[in-house]
Amino acid sequence: MAKFLDTDPDVVRKISENGGYEYIIVGSGFGGGVLANQLAGRGKRVLLVERGGLEFSTHVCNTARPSFARGKDNSPEGNETIYNNLKSWVQPVAGSEPYVGGPLYCLGGRSVVWGLWIPPTPDKTLHEHFPEAIARDLQSRYFRKAFDLVTNGSQDPDTPYPEGQVGQAFINKAKGKVTQAVQFYEASEVVIGPTATEFTADVYRFPQGAYSTVEHLLNRLYSRDPNLTVLMHAEVLDFEHIENPSSKDDEDKKLVSALNVRLTGSDSTMKIFAKGAQVILSAGTICTAQIALNSGLQAHNDLVGKGLSEHAVYAARYAMQRSAREPTAPLLLQTLININDTSALLTVTINYNFLLAGSTHTPIHQYLGSGLQRSGKPRLIELEDGELIFRRNGNSFDTIAILIEYGAPLDDRNMVLNTGAPHPVIRFKREHTYNDEDSLINMQILTTRIRNAAVAAAQVKVDTTGSGISTELTPRPDLLGCGIYAHEVGTMRMDNPNAGNPITGVVDEDLKVHGFSNLHVCDLSVFPYSVESNPSITLAALSLRLAEHLSPNK
């Protein structure tokens, strides 16, 4: 495979020296991978530089397995296991909180392990924290385009999968129970959570499955697309910049002239020349900032590398012993709520294996079953020896999981540090973690209501309104570690629309770096706020918007 896909670095250097590339993109995840595919599809000559190699030819959740148990405790997809074992090390300095994330150096980046939950950034968050042009464009065009991209056009965003596959009566019942449970939280409509997948039962047609950027890139490599060159095993250390001889104002006074690249296994570096190309950094929130710092950009803008942020995420999981033989149908529900004086995305899953049902980071908080009240009516109880019963016969349980994702502002005390270390070094401590006593009790009240609602939706024979455990607070949900799902943002932020000075970030509304004529950034580092929702669909939408800005469709 290496012989088939490898690119000769010396030839790439020579082509760049002759001005053979119109766009040079660093990184191949949801930012760079989507952008490279779009620009190559428009006939533009693109060089994509990836630090890793081809580790996966598809999203890891598409890997075939001989068995699959719905509601299973251990994750059958393996994405969490693969990420934890292949991610690269990031060193937090003293005073930081533990960091459990890290970059994944491979074609497709972290899109091959994460990115399947795709709720869009809420309208209110977009208009409060993002430039108005971006908020308007994403809502009117690019969220829909991104949804069609990552689902391969297989779903209607108004009726996402599994509408039509799971009984409508059960869907309506579950939505109704959760809606009732969140009625005091200023909740938005409870909807089926959208996922970046295509499922199909067509005869002799393989499903396209879970989305990652690697499939589109490989399609072009396999067909020897002349518009896309991928240089793998190539680490961009920094870029050189000069005064722009054709500058008209301060917004384009500098020009990227070359990138310094180190090949894997080599101590020497090579140059890739820009020669009129637009350069787009898409190496991720931490690595893009590291490249920018190595290139001296902080001398031009003090915000470069600062503002590193990730929202607080809380999770809880319950195992409910079934009264029926067959497991309850799987379902993923989401709603935006207000809790602890801020907005949060609430996700509720029933027998939904991916991520929560099998996460090693979220243990089962309660083992539930049914017992008889004096009236003879079944009631919800906590099982004695529930863990032992579950281990012996886990297939007789439904799995219920709850995820609470808060929004969070950027914090300039958190940053990527330019230390010269061979790995990224960060200062990272979240200020907004909601782990004070009052906030934790508020979340316990919420998770108790949601647990009872989910049990009532899945179990028709259990009363969750009477006495017993249904009236007692659940154990407290767990605060998940920094970087656990690759949601870090903010080190190359876009302008803040609410500030008086028009230049308040590192990039403008078109993701161009202020002061440079040919330098853009397209990854989570440009986010001016750590949004409540999983950020992958928003980044994909920003990538599509940037592609249209750089090369408008005619």
Image (cartoon, rainbow, N blue to C red):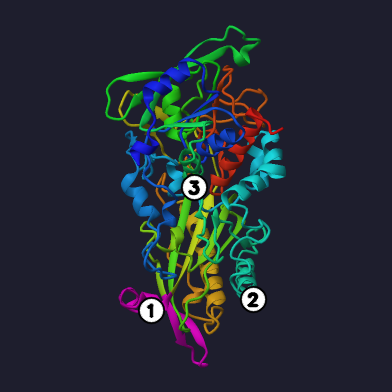
Distance between the Cα atoms at labels 2 and 1? 29 Å
Q: In the figure, residue 181 lies in which quadrant?
A: bottom right
User: In the rendered view, would you say 368 is above or below 309?
Assistant: below
Marks 1 and 3 close (CB-CB < 8 Å): no
The three-letter amino acid code for the residue at tag 2 is: Ala
Residue drawn at (52%, 55%), measured in percent from left and top?
Answer: 208
Quarter of the image for the C terminus: give it.
top right
Quarter of the image for the N terminus: give it.
top left
Identify the residue position indicated by label 3 in the image: 212
Disc 3 crowd, CA 10 A, few/some/many (<14, 14-19, 20+): many
Distance between the Cα atoms at labels 1 and 3? 41 Å
User: Magenta span covers which residues?
Assistant: 368-397
Disc 2 crowd, CA 10 A, few/some/many (<14, 14-19, 20+): few
Marks 2 and 3 close (CB-CB < 8 Å): no
Work out whether mark 2 precedes mark 1 in sequence or the reverse, and give the earlier one.
2
> On residue 383, which mark appears?
1
Q: In the figure, residue 234 lies in which quadrant?
A: top left
Disc 1 crowd, CA 10 A, few/some/many (<14, 14-19, 20+): some
Q: Where is residue 265 in the image (x, y as percent from the top left)?
A: 27, 29
Q: Position of residue 419 (x, y in %)?
A: 34, 24
**SS assignment at label 2:** helix
Q: In this view, does 548 lie to the left or right of 393?
A: right
Between marks 2 and 3 in the image, the one whose residue lies nearer the viewer? 3
> On residue 169, which mark appears?
2
Q: Is residue 376 magenta?
A: yes
Between marks 2 and 1 in the image, the one whose residue lies nearer the viewer? 2
Q: Position of residue 137 (x, y in %)?
A: 70, 39
Residue drawn at (48%, 65%), measured in percent from left and top?
Answer: 352
Number of marks drawn: 3
Distance between the Cα atoms at labels 2 and 3? 33 Å
The three-letter amino acid code for the residue at tag 3 is: Ser
Marks 2 and 1 close (CB-CB < 8 Å): no
